[in-house]
Structure formats: structure tokens, C-alpha cells
Image: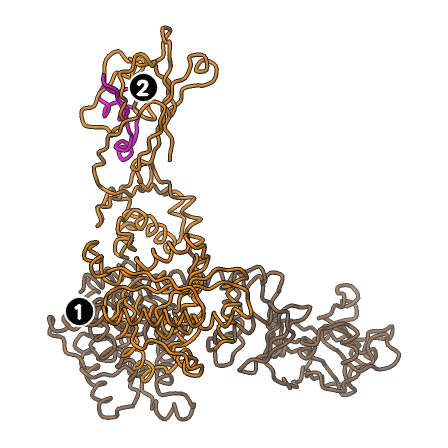
Chain colours: A orange, B brown
Amino acid sequence: MFTKVFKTLNDNDLLKENDRVLVAFSGGPDSTALLYLLIKLKSKIAFDISAVHVNHNIRKEEALKDEKFCKKFCEKYKITLHIVSENIPLLAKKEKTGIEETARNFRLKSFEKLCNEYNYNKIAMGHHADDQVETVLFRLFRGSGRTGLKGMSIKRDKIIRPLLETKRTEILDYLKKHKIKYIEDSSNFENYYQRNFIRNELIPVIKKKINPSVDKSILNFSESISLEEDFLDSLTNKAVKKVVRVTPGRKFQLDLNLFNNYDLWLKRRLLRFCLFELSRSKTMPDKEIINRLVSLVEKNGKEISLPGKIQAKLDNNGLILFERFKNNYQVELPIGETVSLNLPNYKFYSCKTSLNSFKKLVKRNAFTIFLDYNLIKFPIYIRNINQGDRCRFLGMKGSKKISNYLIDKKIPKVYRDEIPLLFDQAGIIWLVGCEIADRVKVNKNTMRVLKIGCARR
Amino acid sequence: MFTKVFKTLNDNDLLKENDRVLVAFSGGPDSTALLYLLIKLKSKIAFDISAVHVNHNIRKEEALKDEKFCKKFCEKYKITLHIVSENIPLLAKKEKTGIEETARNFRLKSFEKLCNEYNYNKIAMGHHADDQVETVLFRLFRGSGRTGLKGMSIKRDKIIRPLLETKRTEILDYLKKHKIKYIEDSSNFENYYQRNFIRNELIPVIKKKINPSVDKSILNFSESISLEEDFLDSLTNKAVKKVVRVTPGRKFQLDLNLFNNYDLWLKRRLLRFCLFELSRSKTMPDKEIINRLVSLVEKNGKEISLPGKIQAKLDNNGLILFERFKNNYQVELPIGETVSLNLPNYKFYSCKTSLNSFKKLVKRNAFTIFLDYNLIKFPIYIRNINQGDRCRFLGMKGSKKISNYLIDKKIPKVYRDEIPLLFDQAGIIWLVGCEIADRVKVNKNTMRVLKIGCARR
């Protein structure tokens, strides 16, 4: 098995000299074999190993026993062991997430923290080929779609999985042959019962009744789909860059002239990308939702409401996808400082400028303005447009409703609600990207100038 | 359900006016519902329906009962019914194929024959959504790879599957509601036991333990993979046209300068395409075999033998894939006639030409030759090169071994064995594509000319 894992490491370029590897070590057979193998490998490649054991405090007594085992093992082989502990059931209750999800998030966060603290550049996980088969089936049955069927990656970001091509039986044989002890019943929390069902009931019966090497079939399938999925992803990303524009208010605007030329599969992927990015829960949208969007575009409809408070609208600007919610905000913009908004995505800055440099250097544009400092009643605030807002804009005789002003300027309705405005203690001074108020303009009497700018963060 | 099937028909453009549809009618619930639905549909679309019932003679008594049921049903609705009968178990024995495969082949062949005879342009099959789910799982477990996971097509060549989006339960409900009788236990032969296991045991337990709508997940998956698979196929076909040249002897020659630039997934698909085309059994090659080929190319190896008597060779001409076998043939080429070879893929023709037209019109080239008719000792034969063959070629003083001649001409070894030669009763007269024998050349005394040509069929 050592040779096999060594080949996996080499073929996939998982380990290099001077790597600092953190091994996720539960004490179960997989991670014990992994840690032992990597220790042996140190004679071939010069790299550092440490281990981390996570105590989830789910099975109290046992959890302590597991911890002890890991300590002893690491002492024997002179490996640094980090022990991370958290009361997962309590945390899960607090955060209202499932035990499994909480445990996984906690593990990953802890690993990342250790990496930052101790400069580990690789995290080695003990997942093996049977885990992979179970993952693929689990995801197929749950409907996670093509992307999920790629299975786990042998290498992704810091994470490496050197055992991903090794079978469970090979690992157990190896441990037995080298007389290495491990914890028999260390449990994997992720979807414990469903995964156990797939492992212990489903796969054995499929092997018996349909194909004794069903695991090989599934592994081959997931490997081939994985490469092709990466390729399709890269095409999707290219198309996203061409077709999709995201407004500061996180509206996804799709250019239909380009969109309509794509194949159906690519249209679907583009839409899936946008909806995924828009969704708060970061879940893959249902096929039905994608189909509704496709037919909205094909049949040249007007507007549909989708689950997750997402709205899809067709107008002259193309297909626009956005979250339905009223975005109320109001923040101060102190002189000389920079203020960031999250939604809409902008940063503002203000500074006093001399009259001379104003005259010499710069022209006012839609996103950089110059005002008469002395005419402003500080403090200045930034807020969203409210119904009834009105202003006497530059050069106007009387005041005008902002909503009417925007209609006259032919700003499409969907974009109007994401325009911020600035006001001082006497009223509106700037409708961002549009116009300033007449009363604060720089004039022949201006002594001091205030420059305000706005840009995407 | 009528509305649903109508939508399926419309969305997928399955039926048009004046179509002549042949319905595969077993008498089971699926095909009975299908036939009944199509009959009702005739009030909306003007098209013709006939049915075909296949008696496989597997379950003697029952088979006759099924046949009777189908007759009665079609009489009632005034539908033409073709009955096709074959002793499948006997045929399977004779042809040494499995019962299921024999039955399927026989069915498809019979349908095709009826289409030709009666001008049917569509064959409607009763496969439904649950069949599709079972097919996808079955193929995943058996390892038929991505292509298999597309599932059955809703429309492919003449075949249409109007029920493919309808569930089994919907079909049964529909039959019950309309009080339509059907045969309860009409069996589907294809992988009977394994499919029944998936249907009756596997899917119910997955529904219970993992996801109640696992079927929807799998259908969505297979639909999305299907479109993307078509797209990847189209890219593969484009690459095949660029990279692969097939020699007359069915050697697949891959241009490595182009091949090496492709992504791994496309390399694999290209190789899979070639091996599939080469294989006599028309089976998808194993992942291991593809990997061996990829590493032959990457590591610049020389040659490997693959299962199915396939040989892979790397030389100046690129990667060459071919079947290892000795191709012995010998056929007469009568004057004025055309003779076709299958392997190597060539046709030959010979004709007498006047001396004048020879002088005026044509130049000899490697595949069209002119000989002195009177110098030939008819009949002429075409055969493969044998060891020890020798000839005194045009302009040579003595004779030379053909093998040495080809070496001197730098013809790569892999191509040499697919060069045919022609001989008359006095010996070799033409090594095709290379040279004629000196003794039969047109000379100043020539009275009559024989023209012989060779081209790809």
C-alpha cells in the first residue's frame, strides 16, 4: 500500500520538499494509517508533519479515550499534536445548524487557524476510495447535481487526500500487517446514518446482485466527470465574464443578445451561477427554477418571482436577477474620511480641496463632485432614496421629485432603488451618479471646496 | 396525464401532422397507456397509428395470451396490428448471444423492417420516468460511464418516448381512471432480475432512508448530463476530424502534435472513440486501458498490446492504433469490372483504353496505372503481400524483395502490411501506391493499353 499511496502522491503532486503538513487525526483506521504512512515517507521526502485531533464532545467518555489514544500515538512517533476541543452539540443548538454541519465547520475553521498560526501549507485528510464511492452515491441520491458527483478532490486549496485511491480493505490490511493500533469505532459524523446505510447495506447488495466491482465503476465515473466538469466550469466562467454584469446593488444583469446564442446547457449553467451567487443560503437552485427562467427569456415574458425572495425581470437592459428587499441605510460621511457601504457596493470619501487645485486639476464627473464648503450644513449623511424625496438640482428653478427626475433621465426602474444620495442638515446635496443640488455648487464667491467621491469598493 | 404527455410531445417536437407512427405494443401497462393516449391524440393532430406486438416465444402459453389481448385491443380501436414472432431462446442459442440481447436486437430489426415496408417514420416506445431512473442507476452500477448515464433519449432517430417524463404511478392511475385493461405481468426482458431488484428493492429503500424524491434527483441529473454530454461529444467529433486519420487497413493514426495540446479529458475521449471504433465487440474501453495509452504517449514509449487484440504503437507518424491480425485475401480483378475489398478499404477497377487516349489524357500516378495489355497473362488477382514476394520494378535491372523495397522507400512498418498487390500469371504486376513491374510497362511497341485504378471505397 505504501507504494500505491506514494504513486498517488507523485501522480497528483500532493507533497513537496519543505511542505508543512497538518494531518487530521481522529485515531480511526483511515487517519491512523495516513499518519503512519506519512511518517514513514519522511525518509524519502524532507517535509514536516504535525497532527490535529478534534474532540467534538459528542460521546463524552469515548471522546476522551480517543484523545488519549492520539496523544500516545503522536508521542511514540514524536509528532506534534494539536488538540482542539469544542462542545459541538451546544454550539449546534446555539447556531441552529445540524450537528454534522457544525462539526464540519468547526473542524475546517480550526484547521485553518492552525495553518495560519503554525504555517502549515497542507492539510492531509484520511478519506479513501470507499468514502469517495459513498460520497458520490450519497450526492446522486440527494440530488446535488453534476457538480456534486465529482466527489471529493484529491487536492483542493490546502487540503490533500493521499488515500483517495486506496480501498478501505487495503487500509485495514496494512494496519494489521504493521500491527498498528487504531480506534475501532471512531465515528464519522457526516450524515452518519445515511452514509452507514450506503456503506453497510446498499453497496454490499449492489455488489452481490449487479456488479461486484460497482465501486470501481463509480470511481471511474466520478473521476471522468470531474475533469469534464472542470472544463465545463471554465467555459461557464468565461461566459459569465462576457454576459453578466453585477450592479452595485447586487443585481445580476444578463446581456440577452449574447445569452440567447448559447447552448441550453450553458444558459442553464449561467443562470445557476447567478442564482447561486444571489442566494443567501448558497444552495444550488432547482432544475424547475432554472427552467422557468429559461422559458421567461424564450417566451419574452416580463417578470417572475422565485423562491428565496429572488425576482427575475426582463427589460431593455436584459434579464435582471435580484433579491427583493427594501435596503434602508443611513451613515455619516465625516470630512476627510472614507466610508464603505456593503449594499449597494460603494465607498465614499470626502476631503477639503483648495480652490486653486480645484480650478487647475479636476473636472466634476458623475462620481466625483466639488461643492462650496461654506454652503454645506455639516454633518453629511449617505442614505437610500425615500419616497417623496425632492431636490432642486443644478441649474433648476424649482425643486423636483427624485422619482420623476430619474424617470425623465430614463434610468431603468430596477436600478433606481440602488442609487444612494447624500444630504446635509439643509437637505439633499447629491444624487450619486446623477446630479448635485444647485444650492451647494461652487460659485464665484466660493472660498473653500469640498471634494466628494464615490467608487465601487 | 394526457396534458402532461401532450406537453412532452410538444416541448420535444415528437409528433407532427402526417407522421406515421408505429407503437411498440406489449400489452403491458406502459405501452397500453401509450397506445391509448396516442389514439386519443388523433383528434388533435392528424397522424397515423399502427401497432406492433412482438412474440418472443419465451413464455409459450402466456405469450399467446398476450398476443390475443393485443389483437383484441387493436380491433376495438381499429388500429392496424403487426404481429412479429420469433423463437428467441433458440435464436439466442444459435447466435451465442444472451436472451435479452437477442430479443432486443430482434425487436429493433423487426421494427426497422416494418418501417421500411409500411413507411412508418416514428417508432413510439412506452418507456417512462421510472424506467429512466432504473436505467441510469443500472448503468452507473455496471460502469457504462458518462455516456450511459445520459439515460434513454426522448427522441433519437425514428424512436420517440412520449412517456419518458411520466411516472409509473401516473400511468397506472390513468389506466385505472379510464378503465383500460392491460396485461399485469408482461415482463421486460432486459436484465430482468437486476432491473427488478433496482425497481422493487433498491429505489424504495433509498427513498425511505435517504431521499423520498431520489427519482427526481436522478432524472434531473441525467437530463443535465445528457445535454452536456452532447456538447462534449460534438467537441470530441471535431477533434477526431482534426487528429485522427484512418488508413485503408483500419489503422487509426493520431497526430500527436495536435493531440498533446488537448485537455486530458479530451485526450481520453479521443482515445475512447478510436478504441471503440476498432473493437469488434463495440464495447467502451476500460479506464485503465485509456490511462495506459495516455501514459504511452506522455512517456514517449514505443508500443503496447491491449486487450481485444489491439496494438498501440508510437512512431514518426504519431500514435497508431490497430487490430493485430493477419489479413489474407486474394480476389480476381476481371477486365472491365470493379472489385471492392473491405480490409484494406479499397476498390479496384480495370478497363481497356485506346493507346491514343492514354497518350493524350492521362498521366500515371500512384493509384492509376497503365500497362501494356498484350504483355499481361490474365487473369489478374489482388492479394496481400506475402513474405518473400519479389519483383523487378519499373526501371530496375534485377528483382528485389518487396520488403526491402518498402524499407528503402521508407514506408513505415505499420502501413506496409496493408498495401495490396496485383499479379498476373507471370508474377507481380503492381504494388499499389508504389510501382508497377518493369515487364508490363507501356513501351513503343504497345498496341493496347490496360488501365487499372485503385481508390478508397
Name the kind of residue labelled 2 in the image: Ile
Is residue A63 at least partly visible in the picture? yes
Where is residue B373? Give x, y as percent.
Answer: 78, 78
Please tell me which residue lies in front, B100 or A430: A430
Where is residue A102? Give x, y as percent.
Answer: 26, 59
Q: Residues within 10 Å of mark 2 (few under 14, many from 20)?
A: many
**Residue A425 forms part of the magenta stretch:** yes
Where is residue B19? Give x, y as percent.
Answer: 31, 65
Q: Could you tell me which secondary element the residue under label 2 belongs to?
A: strand
Q: Does residue B208 appear to the left or right of A15 in the view shown? A: left
For marks 2 and 1, give the CA distance. 64 Å
Name the kind of residue labelled 1 in the image: Glu
Q: Does residue B408 appear to the left or right of A413 in the view shown? A: right
Please tell me which residue lies in front, A38 or A9: A38
Is residue A224 at least partly visible in the picture? no
Q: Quadrant of the N terminus of chain B?
A: bottom left
Q: Could you tell me which secondary element the residue under label 1 belongs to?
A: helix
Q: Is residue A75 above or below residue A107?
A: below
State the residue position of label 1: B170
Q: Does residue A30 appear to the left or right of B218 in the view shown? A: right
Q: Is residue B64 above or below residue A125?
A: below
Q: Which of pointers 2 and 1 indicates the residue nearer the eye?
A: 2
Magenta residue span = A400-429
State the residue position of label 2: A436
The disc at residue B153 is none
Where is residue A354? Give x, y as percent.
Answer: 42, 14
Q: Quadrant of residue B132?
A: bottom left
Chain where mark 2 sits: A
Q: Quadrant of the C terminus of chain B?
A: bottom right
**Residue B228 forms part of the magenta stretch:** no
Q: Is residue B168 above or below residue B423?
A: above
| Extreme residue in the top direction | A445
